Image (cartoon, rainbow, N blue to C red):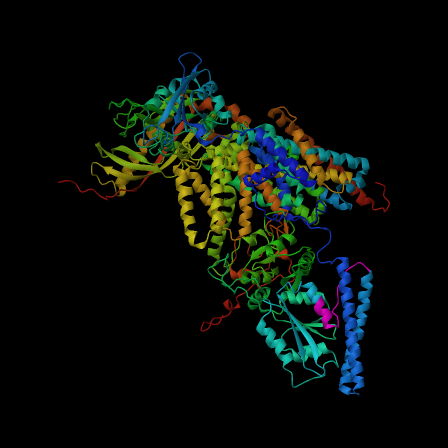
Amino acid sequence: MGESGITKIAKNIKKLLVYQPERLPDPFVLDENQGDGKTAKEPPVALKGVRELESMLRYARRLAIFMEKTIEILRNGQRPDKAELLQIEYTALEQQQGELSAIKLSYNSTEAVEPAISTSLEENQKVIEDLYNLPLNKDVVIRKLTIPGQPAVKAMLIFMDGLADKKVVNMTVLNPLMMMRNARPELYSADLVNIIIEQYLPSGQASRVGSFKEVQQGINTGDAVLFFDGIGEAVTVETKGFEHRGVDRPATEQSVRGAQNAFTEVLRVNTALIRSMLHSSDLVTEMIPVGKRGHTNCAVMYLASIANRNLVAEVRRRIQGISTDLIIDSGILEHLIVDFPSNPFPQTLSTERPDRVVEHLVEGRVGILLDGSPFGHIVPITIFTLMHSADDFSLHYYYTNMLRMIRWIGGFMSMLLPGIYLAISTFHQEAMPTELLLSITAARAQVPFPTIFEILIMELAFELIREGGLRIPGILGSTIGIVGAIILGQAAVTAKIVSPIMVIVIAVTGLASYSIPDYRLASAFRLFRWIFVLLALAMGLVGMACGFAVFTAVLCSMKSFGAPYLAPIAPKTTPGGDIILRKASHMQQRRPDELNPQDDIRQSAVSRPWTEEPSIGGDEL
Amino acid sequence: MKAYHVGKMGIAEGIALVFGLVIPHLFLSRLADVIQENGQLSWLTMSFYTVISLVVLFMMVYVIHSVPGDFVTVCQQLVGNLGAWLIVIVYICLFFANSSLLLRQYAEYTLITALPKVNFQLVIVWYALTTGIMCYLGIEALCRTGYILLPFMAGGLMLVCVMVSPFYVAYNLTPWQGNGIQVAVQSGIKGVGFNIGVLSLVFLSSAFQNGKTIKKIALYALGGSLVLRITFMLVYTMVFGVAIGSEKVMPFFELARLVYINQYIQRIEALFIVVWVFIGLLAIASSLYIGLYLITVLLKLPTMRPIVPLGVMAIAQFSMLPPDIGYTIYVDRLMLQVSQVGIYLFPGILFIMALVKKRRKKPCADS
Amino acid sequence: MCRQLMWWTGLLVGISILLSGCNGAKELDQRANVIAIGLDTGQQEGMFTVSYQLAIPKGESKGEGSEEAVVLTNTAASIAEARNLLSSEVAMQPVLAHAKIIVIGEALARKGLDKILGPFMRYREYRGTMYVVVTRGTAKSFFEQNKPAFVASMSKFYEQKLANGEEAGYFLSTTLHQYYARLKSNSGQPYMTFVAINPMTGEGHISTSKATGDKLDGYNAGDIPRQGGNAVDFAGVAMFDHDKMVATLSTTEARMLSMVLGRYSSGFIVVEDPLDSKSAVNVSLRLGSKPKISVTLVEGKPMINVHILLEGEITSIASGIGYEQGSQLDILEDQINKTMQQQMINMIKRTQEYNVDVAGFGYYLRPAFQSNKEFDDYKWNEKFNQAEVNVEVNTQIRRTGLMIRTVPIE
């Protein structure tokens, strides 16, 4: 009270001099959800009560309107057609009342109940709006229409904008239903849904659904769903037509011969590609939805007359037994269903080529495709399958065998070469010829770092180039090659940071790892390379030998969906003519033994009967 | 993993198992002893003890199939509870001793051959750990690894033998009677302990399909090892002669050291160390596994995995007991003598009891 | 529980690896490579002079071009001591793994090698594949005066010389393994390559004069009349009676020895022209097959039969006589046979003189005995000088070079 003049002046001076920070609102902090512990799907009790109250109110309103209409009609004298209408509406109201009792029961309890498709169109619309967060969610389109009939049927069409092909919706659903002016059938007399499906929807796939779960699944994948007033069921019509990438050349598995198409992200396109190569009635495609929120479709394909039944059942069991939110890529699916998820060696074959899938299906394996991923999986496999490439069978077997030997040598080199070099140059120097030893010594004498450090530096550099090359935009792609080669190779040697022989060793190792056809196998070998380098650092060749023995033992104890990982070498089974080296095409009689298919023989012993018959124009035998 | 064996081990795995148990002494010092004792007739010695061990194995196969059940049950049926415990405990001791002696010798020889400056206890720990891991993974993984690595081992041995061909002096194999046929036969009969590993087939008999498989495995494995041993012994005698041959501590390593083809292919024994280490790991792991398996079966434990680390520590400690290499070789020789008990005495008793039991054929025979 | 166990084990193993040091791992440039070892008797009684020749890698040396090698000499009471001293003299840790040759001074060889042989067979750094040679004079002077003219590096010189140079049989390369094997077998005596530094005055000294019909003289190493090039001669063979050197064989005798051992590859033989004693005929001979040697006991005395098949190519006929055809060829072959036989018998008689069976005839006697004990009791090495020797040489001249006849000069 009564500020004196001095205090006022002081205050004003202070206001003048002191820096006043800008008044900004508080920044957003991502805190925990208030009232944690409840799932978002379940509405709070109070709101739930509100919904039930509203449906009861709507019923009451409808009942009131019906009663008014009845009174009006009765006052105006009897009209048989109108009486029929009234009859129909009366039945509908009766059904709705039945539903209401269920709602009343749930009003008293505290559990959420899955809403069933109601006979009232309004109810259904309210449920849809609830489920899809309308009108916030602009993707879902609700189109009300009236089907001309006797009496006219009020219907509601719901589809997802972008997922459903608008032309197909218009042509196969809206057009036939709204344009049947002339027919005017009596729809309510018999099973309305059946009549609509069988007679009035010219779509290839139309089915009836009875629960909102199926309705949601249909809408979320691009189907159009029709609700009818007075009927407690709905109709889904196949209208999928979203934009997707066309069938293109394989990005990661190029080949010289063989088909050049690859899987895309749409499941139906992929299964179609497989079917286009394998025209067999035995080819079964089972669809299994995975993921609670994603509901992604997973297709399991196999030849019913060849594949082992237990294997198929096991695959199905494992996929059905996954409990997760969403599976976006087939790689995630792979890690959820394999026997040894913590082992970096891949236990399925991941491919984007339909011809490879077909080849393995015929041998008795099972193919797994996931909607949204252009990579399919083949199970069960052995490590030898991972080293086969796509066009191995199209080329002559001598050449293919030579390539396979190179791949295997490359695989082992990529894992063992730096370790061997380290072991020999630091522990077992007598194994090197004297001349080589002296020249390497001369080169190394000027390098200040020990060999292990050189290996680490060069490996790191190589991995940096590799990672960078993946992410660099295409225009600058060639710079990486020049930068990598010149700077890391030549300049490092000239600057005496690494010795020349180390550059050679690392470069050969890197190239060798690229010769392995399967990317994940190459990554696994790269991982183990580090372990072998550490073992070589500690104990020389003895350490590497111990490591290799343990490595082989671990591989031997692995199984891929029940088939041993190193069959047919480790448990000695009948070879199928295609392990490390490959036999000629006319000599491959058996399917791989470890798959235990229902039918072992795939080619008769004489697979070229024409060689035994006399040729045209030749002498008789 | 469910059980120690699933009953699906095939011929190849059995061969790898027996080979792994029987061959490694070829790479250590015992060959020098054999050559010193028998001279140029060592091949006769080797043939003798191989044939005898085959006969013993066939006897034991008969025994194990005369009474249903695993080895301990069979022993209990035939010689009573006390007898069974005695027999199995002796076998456990034999296999554990074999395993620790092998471990010690391998560690010592690693110091001589590949890593002269390494800390001895580190090598013991290293080998023990690796064999522990391999035992832990189970008999199937062990045998399959053996089966994969075995051709490299045999191939390496043959390669060394071929590469020292410039140094062959065929007359070193004469006088062909060496130190006398009688001496050779006697050491053949006494040296059956070399092949005691073949009894592992009997202990693990439920893992193999039937008796015929076991006999086939024994035939191939022992026959193959005999061929390998004789070839090596002949080459070794040709190159070094009997006098120098009995001086060497490690015959195989010395042979590998002698390889000199040209300027570039010489001093390559470091590369054969890899082969040598493989076979050593397999041998120690298999021996350890059999010992632990017998313990498990004897004490009726549900699974073997928890005692694998204990077994590993036990053999590591045992292997460090002898104070020097001379004493180790002496104990090794002693072990060879003691294993005769395991080869002659116990199978003999069991076989006789099995025959007696068969003859009796009374339903309530008290045996 | 399993993961914990794995973590603990991994931790323990990792710590033990880190605490135990490098386990003897040494970088390439931390080791000094010894490529040759020389052994001499020391000035004082009971001392040894050990010379080590170390290789300097290219790029480190001050000069450009050829690799230099440095010679260090230690005097110590034993070889092991000398090796110890070596580590105080060289900047890096010396390793003997790449040693190619062991040079033994003649004085030490004559005194006896039994005292120094121990570490060679027991210590792991020495190998059986190292070459051993005996040098006239001292090993130290050998290293100092050995300057290879054609080969860039010293280690290559030793290896190529001893691995590939045995063409004419004038010297035989020996490894430590061969020496030791012969030493311990009681079926023969060891021998070693004999080398020397040639004074290069152009004057020589003949040690074995021509045999009848032969036109070649035998020289010992160091006595060959020559000038220019590297001063080192590799010629002849040093004979050992167990571990003491007794004598040397000259070049022509070494050639005969190599024929008996089956190691003769090819060389020129110059014989007197059988029809014109003033000219000579050159023939290039090689062994047609391994020599057939049999040694039997006749009334307790050994009888040695040597049969050698030689195949030849005429390389020069000075007199122009047409030896290429028919019966003339037989005459020439006869002459060669006689000459070779005489030389062979001379060589074997010389070895019998010293009672040193360097040809290893005892090996061929072994099948006659039943057991090792019998053979040991027979004591071949003492009975060698009682043996009767029959040599039969069969020469087949297969080719005549580029000419089939010589037209006389008018």
Q: Is residue C322 magenta-colored?
A: no
Q: Quadrant of the N terminus of chain A?
A: top right
Q: In the shown orientation, is residue A194 left or right of residue C60? A: right
Is A147 above or below relative to A478?
A: below
Quarter of the figure with residue C249:
top left
The spot of residue B112 in percent (x, y) is: 54, 29
Quadrant of the image occupied by residue B98: top right
The question of residue A110 being in magenta is answered with yes
What percent of the width, then of the height, locates residue A94? 81, 74
Foreground pick, B364 / B11: B11
List x then y, in percent, for residue B366. 85, 41
Q: Write the start and end of the magenta stretch as one range.
A: A109-126
Q: Classify residue A70 as left or right of residue A309.
A: right
Judged from this view, the residue extending furthest toward the top is: C44
Q: Classify A186 as above or below A359.
A: below
**Residue B178 makes an appearance in the image:** no
The residue sitting at the left extreme is C410
Could you say which is closer to the camera, residue A106 or residue B16? A106
- At 73% across and 44% down in the image, what residue appears? B62
Q: Quadrant of residue C67?
A: top left
What secondary structure predominates along the stretch shown in magenta?
loop
- Can residue A231 be seen here? The reply is yes
Number of residue marks:
0
Image coordinates of residue A544 in percent, x first then y, are 55, 38
Residue B217 in the figure: left or right of residue C120: right
The residue at 77%/72% (across/down) is A61
Q: Horizontal placement of C263 versus B38: left or right?
A: left
